[in-house]
Amino acid sequence: MDFITIAFLAVAAFLAFKMFAPARGVKKIDTATLKQNLGDRNRYYLDVRTPGEFKGNHIKGFKNIPLQTLPTQLDKLPRDKEIVVICQSGMRSKRAAQLLKKNGFNNITEVSGGMSAWR
């Protein structure tokens, strides 16, 4: 392999890792664990999908704040509770978790597999 091919593969591997690795300091849970924890008053349940996705199917107890509007609605989120974030597959919830971390939220949990894994 030549240098350009190796460099390209290295960059692609790095980007794939950054895309799928959990945000630093963010916990992950599966949907089975989520089912056990639902209704816990020490947690705030946040669904970052679009209003249409949320209306079509959602988990009772989750509040809908779409990812694209989340930066302007951070003041609606409690800082004294664990925030459990879900989306459709896990990509938007990861971005939401990163945004929350950057804005001083410390107790964040992503739901692995999102609504696609919910049964």
Image (cartoon, rainbow, N blue to C red):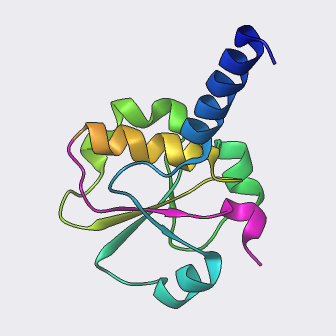
Q: How many marks?
A: 0
Query: Residue 70: x percent and y percent?
Result: 43, 37
- Hey, which residue is sitting farthest bottom in the picture? 36
Residue 67's place in the image compared with 46, above or below, is above
75 left or right, relative to 29: left
Viewer-closest of 69 and 2: 2
Tell me if residue 3 comes above or below residue 21 in the rendering: above
Is residue 110 inside the magenta stretch? Answer: yes
Q: Residue furthest right?
A: 1
Q: Position of residue 44 (x, y in %)?
A: 37, 66
Relative image position of residue 118 (x, y in whole percent): 72, 73
Residue 13 horizontal/vertical position (percent): 66, 33
Q: Is residue 84 magenta?
A: no
- What's drawn in magenta, residue-wise? 104-119
Q: Look at 77% across and 79% down and name the residue there.
A: 119
Of residues 77 and 109, which is closer to you in this image? 109
Q: Is residue 40 left or right of residue 32?
A: left
Q: Residue at x 55, y 84 (%)?
A: 33
